[in-house]
Image (cartoon, helix red, strand yellow):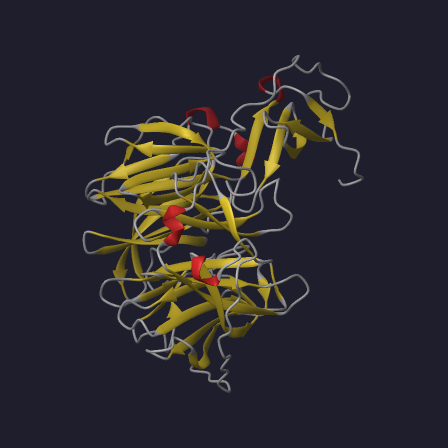
Amino acid sequence: MHQSTKSLVVLAACIWPAWSSSCHADPMRLEPIAEVPGTVQAMLVRAKNANEVLLATQNPGADCGHGTAASIWKAVLDPTTHNVLRLEKKQDLSNIQNVRDTLFEAADGTLFAGGGWCGYKPPYFSTDGGETWQPADAGPVHPPNSTFSFVGFRGAIYAGTGYEPHNGEVYRWLGQGNWKRVLDIPPPRSIVNNLVVFQEHLFVGSVIYGWGGKGREASVPVYVSADGEQFKPTEGIPPGCTVSQLLVANDRLLAWADDQVFAWNEKRWEKLGVLAPGIAMNRHAVVVGRGTIVNHGKLPDDDAEGLYVSNNLGRGWKQVEVVQGITALHAHGDALFVAAQPKGKEASQVYRAIVDGGLATIETKPWGAATPSPGPDPEPTPASGPGSTARMRVQLADGSTVTGQLDQGELVIKTEYGTLRVPIDKLRRIERVDDGKP
């Protein structure tokens, strides 16, 4: 099963951010360290060996439920220069085409890769440092569909799974491909995409995807458990919200739900503010240092997509580097790894971002688009009535817009991991988009 390719070494070259005139003032600089065939979906610096970086790729020819298999690569870094000494393809994961953006290392060194994309696609695991991998479904009980997330809690490994027609579920790893299901979340929550441990409790965030949205008014966005066996619903986040990410920054547990930022106060969630469009639904965010959040996307006022930082728990963002086609982020100590695949390219460029602590000094003002602009409520028309499927644009308070599809009197905004449905009677100043798109 072991596969090896000719080693590839790319010498590092510093790329200075366009927003800084002095290299000495830069809080971050990117060094390209490797070019990897395919689309890098996930990266992981091994806790057992910080000079090894694992990369999982989706490859050309992969498709929904069939096609080219996903691959695992290993980059070995020079301990002093951090340049790549060699890049080796370790194995094709023959049963899956996609790892669902997820690589994870347990405390004992066991490695896990997510799995999914149309039909039953098992997660994979490795017990030899990523040299060989096997499907994690040997036992009678195992995730029935895609696996999106992993976490270690009280000495055990938990996996978040699901995808319509299956419910969102949580499984505990028993070893050697065996699992125990510990949580089954009722529809319409069909994906558990976030597992986070905070203050000795396990928090489970989920996505509303599919099922026609039925039951959303009583659904629970986040569950919590003190023992990994019994899970209780949390309060404070509206029932219909999709949780794009749970993360810990500045010693606070955050939930990004739809376009809102919530913080856990040990009893319930409190709303802190709103996320900016172009950032809110991207679940690749990582925390560098104690509390600087790094994510990618594009704000309406910026000319191009790139890397963004937030120093106020996700309520405000500033672009620090223009990088097109970012597909994965991974933080390890003072280093940030960035994978990008520009449009039209079949290979990904992997960068190591050197952070000197200056990120924490960047001012990130809260985003102002919390509610739709004032104005008359929209009247049902052929373009916005209950039976319409027209594309519509909603203007927000700061003048920016969000575009979605009308369906049964709701504005539907599709994202990579979920669908937002907002009743049009809750919106103001909507207009039809005549762009010819379906």
Q: In which quarter of the view is residue 224 placed?
A: top left
Query: Going 33% across and 74% down the picture, which residue do you hit?
Result: 51
The answer to whether one can see residue 347 in this image is: yes
Query: Going 29% across and 28% down the picture, which residue do you hit?
Result: 268
Front in this rendered view, residue 269 or 156: 269
| Image mark count | 0
Q: Position of residue 151 (x, y in %)?
A: 30, 53
Q: Quadrant of the C terminus?
A: top right
Front in this rendered view, residue 329 or 412: 329
Q: Position of residue 119 (x, y in %)?
A: 53, 55
Query: Going 42% across and 76% down the picture, which residue do you hit?
Result: 75
Q: Position of residue 94 (x, y in %)?
A: 49, 71
The answer to whether one can see residue 102 in this image is: no
Is 286 on the left-hand or right-hand side of 34? Answer: left
Q: Position of residue 362 (x, y in %)?
A: 42, 46
Q: Quadrant of the N terminus?
A: bottom left
Is 115 on the left-hand or right-hand side of 78? Answer: right
Q: Is residue 323 above or below residue 270?
A: below
Front in this rendered view, residue 263 or 55: 263
Q: Is residue 346 above or below residue 327?
A: below
